[in-house]
Structure formats: structure tokens, C-alpha cells
């Protein structure tokens, strides 16, 4: 089997009877951890009309996330802000995806755990996940739009991360996390300039690290 696929829609059932989809969310944010999810689709499982989480309304994402979680083996994992700052966002995203896959596999019945190395693991993007040697990893550019298991992973990861960022908004008011979820919007950047970074901001990211350097000035008044 090839390691990548063309930019056509992919019928996951042509890949095998068991297919794991993997995606991450929050990679481009200025604040908060990066989340990843892995979802197992089996032939015969209840299926839902899924697409890239970014193409759906919040209400539809919530609805589909609940359905996927209720009907499919799945796992949601994260890499922390500290890990992002320590190893960089790309490595942290891949780490979160590896954690999601490993946790999903650990949940499976023993007979399926014996076979899982032969199942396709379809990963959104063009990079395989380090640390999963021996597994049948397939990279799929724009996989969240083109392959249902990846779309499902995208949806549940985004709903989980959005929920977490809404909770963070109550801990760190004034930044608007409940609305922009940590992404680099005009509202977020304005709040950063007014308030300075808080503890969940990614200190190595442009737009944040400059303010941290400024906060080291005795006259700044920022608390980081």
C-alpha cells in the first residue's frame, strides 16, 4: 500500500475492514495545548456524515462529536504548552497524535490488539508519527476533508479543545478565549497587548515572545 494518496476523496472502506483516523487541532494557536484524536472505524459500525471540523457550525460539531464518541472506539490526547515551548509545535503535535493512537490501541479487545499493526492508520497531513514504527501509517494531505475516520478525529479533537479553552476563559478573563479559542485573532492580539501573556500562552510563539521580553522591563507591569 502506498504511503500517501492523491487529493481525491477516499472511501475508507477500500483501505481495510478496520481503519484508524488521526488528526490534531490547535497547532496554530497562540495559547493552550495542542489536541489530537484517534478514531477507529470498522465495517458495520454506525456511520455519520462527517467532514472537516472547521467546515461545520459549532452546534453541528457538538452533535457529530457526541455521535462519534458514542459509536466508535476513540481517544483524545494533548501536548501541553510547556511541551510545545520545549520541543516545538510540530513535534508536540506529533506527540499528541502518538498518545492518542497508543491510548486508543490500549482500549481495544485483546484479539483486535493482536491485529492492529496491520490496520491502516490514516494521518492528516504529510508526516508519519514518530514512535509508531511497525504500524501501517498512511499520510493524507487534507485528510480531514477527504476521509471519514480522519474527519471524525478532527471533530472530536476540536470539540474537546474548544470546551477546554472555554473553561480557561474563566481562569484567565479578558483574553476572549471562549470566542477565539487561542487563535491569533485581532481581539486576541489586542488583549495580549493590553494584558500581557498569561500562563497558557505559548512563550516561543511570535506575538507572545516579544511581549514576554518586554515584560522583563521593570516598567512593563505585565505579569507572566
Image (spheres, rainbow, N blue to C red):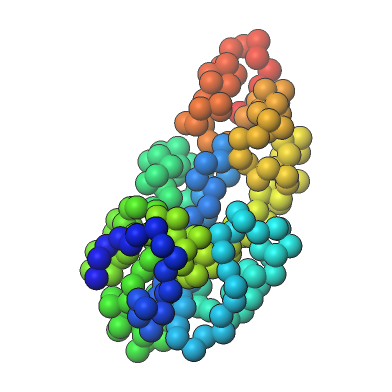
- Left or right of 9 on screen, residue 201: right
- Residue 103: name its quadrant: bottom left
Tell me the quarter of the picture where residue 113 sits: bottom left
The residue that appears at 65% across and 14% down in the rendered structure is: 220
Q: Quadrant of the C terminus?
A: top right
Q: Is residue 149 above or below residue 224?
A: below
Q: Residue at x 31, y 65 (%)?
A: 137
Left/right placement of residue 85 relative to residue 219 reads left
Quadrant occupied by the N terminus: bottom left
Residue 198, position as x, y percentages in the image: 63, 33
Residue found at the far top of this picture: 219
Query: Does the image show residue 153?
Result: no
| Residue under the image location 47 percent in, 51 percent down | 79
Give residue 120's quadrant in the image: bottom left
* Image: 214 above or below 132: above
Closer-to-camera residue (210/59): 59
Q: Is residue 118 visible?
A: yes
The one of 184 and 112 positioned closer to us in this rendering: 184
Q: Nearer the viewer, residue 217 or 169?
A: 169
Residue 171 horizontal/vertical position (percent): 72, 44
Residue at image point 56% right, 59% down: 52
Point out the residue furthest to the front here.
8
Amino acid at each position: 500500500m502506498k504511503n500517501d494518496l492523491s487529493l481525491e476523496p477516499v472511501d475508507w472502506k477500500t483501505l481495510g475492514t478496520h481503519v484508524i483516523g488521526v488528526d490534531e487541532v490547535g497547532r496554530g494557536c497562540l495559547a493552550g495545548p495542542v489536541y489530537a484524536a484517534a478514531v477507529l472505524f470498522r465495517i458495520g459500525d454506525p456511520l455519520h456524515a462527517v467532514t472537516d471540523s472547521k467546515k461545520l457550525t459549532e452546534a453541528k460539531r457538538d452533535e457529530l462529536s457526541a455521535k462519534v464518541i458514542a459509536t466508535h472506539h476513540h481517544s483524545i490526547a494533548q501536548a501541553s504548552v510547556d511541551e510545545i515551548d520545549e520541543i516545538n509545535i510540530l513535534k508536540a503535535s506529533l506527540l499528541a497524535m502518538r498518545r492518542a493512537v497508543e491510548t486508543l490501541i490500549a482500549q481495544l479487545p485483546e484479539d483486535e490488539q493482536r491485529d492492529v499493526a496491520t490496520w491502516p492508520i490514516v494521518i492528516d497531513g504529510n508526516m508519519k508519527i514518530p514512535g509508531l514504527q511497525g504500524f501501517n501509517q498512511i499520510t493524507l494531505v487534507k485528510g480531514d476533508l477527504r476521509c471519514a475516520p480522519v474527519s471524525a478525529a478532527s471533530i472530536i479533537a476540536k470539540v474537546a479543545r474548544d470546551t477546554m479553552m472555554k473553561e480557561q476563559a474563566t481562569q484567565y478573563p479578558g483574553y476572549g478565549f471562549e470566542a477565539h479559542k487561542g487563535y491569533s485573532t485581532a481581539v486576541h492580539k489586542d488583549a495580549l497587548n493590553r494584558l500581557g501573556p498569561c500562563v497558557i500562552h505559548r512563550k516561543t510563539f511570535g506575538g507572545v515572545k516579544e511581549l514576554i521580553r518586554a515584560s522583563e522591563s521593570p516598567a512593563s507591569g505585565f505579569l507572566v
